[in-house]
Amino acid sequence: QQQVKQSPQSLIVQKGGISIINCAYENTAFDYFPWYQQFPGKGPALLIAIRPDVSEKKEGRFTISFNKSAKQFSLHIMDSQPGDSATYFCAASMSNRGSTLGRLYFGRGTQLTVWP
Amino acid sequence: GAGVSQSPRYKVTKRGQDVALRCDPISGHVSLYWYRQALGQGPEFLTYFNYEAQQDKSGLPNDRFSAERPEGSISTLTIQRTEQRDSAMYRCASSLGLVGGRGSEETQYFGPGTRLLVL
């Protein structure tokens, strides 16, 4: 059972366009939602993360939009560049009260290709 | 500074053999995680440690898989009597893991992985 559902599986965007990747979850205990970027042959690297107490977080060209009631969150990449071509994973985790975060539940990934 | 390192980077073994995969986390990181990533899929949780204590091993597929972190630093994931279905990329991650931490303390930093192929 996939705890975090991600779409689309692949995405092709022209340079300068907006890339949008969506994720949905069921477990309301999740309270940490990171996005990871993975280039071929490399491990995933944190791109941006959000907690459910805010509806949006922006870092440069990357924005997470979070809809708590719908249990959905999305990654927006503005002014997409060829260097953004990679696989993107959304994930979710829950913190134990007074303790550290546990496991990350990952989506299946979105392969983004940005054409020059 | 140095990131998470894993060894070996590639391992080819015959069915039935035991393998040991090593993870060296970022210095000072309390939490260490093991994931398995199939081609074209997201990482799938196996187990994790805080210091030397194994906190959650619910993701280990069966009793052929085990992990340890005896001194709270380096960790070893061992697969006994390997089977072809064990072939995958095994990734390790570490985080500062401060109690009640928010922000960067929660970030899991991933290593380059060990590609395991069981023939």
Image: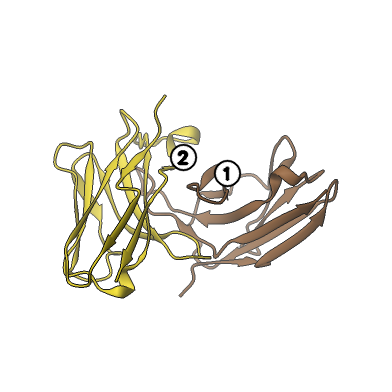
Chain colours: A brown, B yellow
- Image quarter where the N terminus of chain A lies is bottom left
The x, y position of residue B2, in whole percent, is 39, 28
**Which residue corresponds to mark 2?**
B107
Q: In the shown orientation, is residue B66 left or right of residue A41? A: left
Amino acid at pointer 2: Thr
Task: State if disc 2 and disc 1 touch (CB < 8 Å).
Answer: yes
Q: Going 46% across and 39% down the picture, which residue do you hit?
A: B107
Amino acid at pointer 1: Ala
Q: Going 31% across and 69% down the picture, which residue do you hit?
A: B86
- Label 2 crowd (10 A; few <14 / some 14-19 / many >=20): some
Instruction: Say which element carries label 1.
Output: strand
The x, y position of residue A78, in whole percent, is 79, 45
Q: Going 35% across and 43% down the picture, which residue do you hit?
A: A100
Q: Going 35% across and 34% down the picture, which residue do you hit?
A: B98
**Which residue corresponds to mark 1?**
A49
Between B109 and B4, the residue placed more toward the observer is B4
